[in-house]
Image (spheres, rainbow, N blue to C red):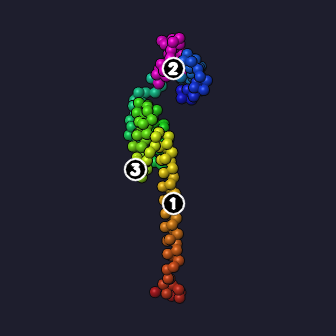
């Protein structure tokens, strides 16, 4: 339904056209569901929301929906990369639309799930909307990684330099073993 919805937005269809167009694109078990569903729910006057609700009730169990909603609500970055956290945030957010139905709620939910090294500086940075917060998180994460790589390279090169300045044991130089 998500991919069909993109087409419907592009086509600027009316409510009735949205239902007809979506139903026309259904295949397999979804098409069989539609044939049965329209017997008890006439096409005339059906809204797109009623169609979606009927489809979801038939194809997505409420138990799964509740699990995904709870998964979103407890989502934390943890050991994930920022990209993985963003992907999971976007994927799971559709199961709890009421938790992110304003830009402020979306920002707060996203920020509260970040790990400390990102969360702390971003919580005091000004971000007027979710997209700017997301951009700031990506920039900060990238800068943190660059600094970690720089420190790692510096430590490795410092170790190599230290190793070359050490004097070998005299017995090893002369070829004699103690």
Q: In the image, is residue 12 above or below residue 124?
A: above
Q: Residue 161: give x, y in percent of width and height.
A: 52, 74
Which structural element holds mark 3? helix
Q: CA distance from mark 2 to mark 3?
A: 42 Å
User: What residue is pinned by disc 2?
Assistant: 48
User: What residue is pinned by disc 1?
Assistant: 149
Query: Residue placed at 48% from the left, 59% from the top?
Result: 148
Report if the CB atoms under discs 2 and 3 are less than 8 Å apart.
no
Crowding at label 2, few (<14), some or many (≥20) Cα neighbours within 10 Å? some
Q: Residue 101: give x, y in percent of width and height.
A: 43, 31
Write the start and end of the magenta stretch as one range: 31-56
Crowding at label 1, few (<14), some or many (≥20) Cα neighbours within 10 Å? few
Closer to us: 25 or 141: 141
Query: Residue placed at 47% from the left, 39% from the top?
Result: 129
Closer to us: 73 or 98: 98
User: What residue is pinned by disc 3?
Assistant: 120
From where the camera sits, is residue 73 visible?
Answer: yes
Q: CA distance from mark 3 to mark 1?
A: 21 Å
- From this viewpoint, which residue is outermost toward the right? 11
Q: Residue 112: give x, y in percent of width and height.
A: 39, 43
Q: Is residue 120 left or right of residue 169?
A: left
């Amino acid at each position: 339904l998500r991919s069909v919805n993109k087409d419907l937005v592009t086509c600027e269809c009316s409510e009735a056209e949205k239902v007809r167009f979506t139903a026309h694109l259904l295949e397999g078990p979804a098409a069989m569901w539609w044939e049965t569903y329209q017997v008890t729910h006439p096409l005339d006057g059906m809204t797109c929301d009623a169609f979606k609700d009927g489809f979801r009730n038939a194809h997505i169990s409420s138990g799964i929906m509740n699990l995904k909603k709870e998964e979103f609500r407890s989502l934390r970055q943890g050991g994930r990369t920022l990209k993985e956290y963003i992907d999971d945030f976007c994927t799971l957010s559709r199961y709890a639309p009421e938790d992110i139905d304003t830009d402020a709620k979306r920002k707060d939910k996203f920020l509260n799930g970040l790990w400390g090294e990102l969360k702390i500086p971003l919580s005091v940075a000004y971000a007027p909307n979710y997209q700017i917060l997301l951009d700031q998180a990506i920039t900060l994460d990238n800068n943190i990684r660059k600094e970690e790589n720089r420190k790692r390279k510096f430590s490795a090169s410092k170790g190599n330099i230290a190793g070359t300045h050490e004097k070998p044991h005299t017995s090893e130089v002369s070829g004699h073993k103690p």
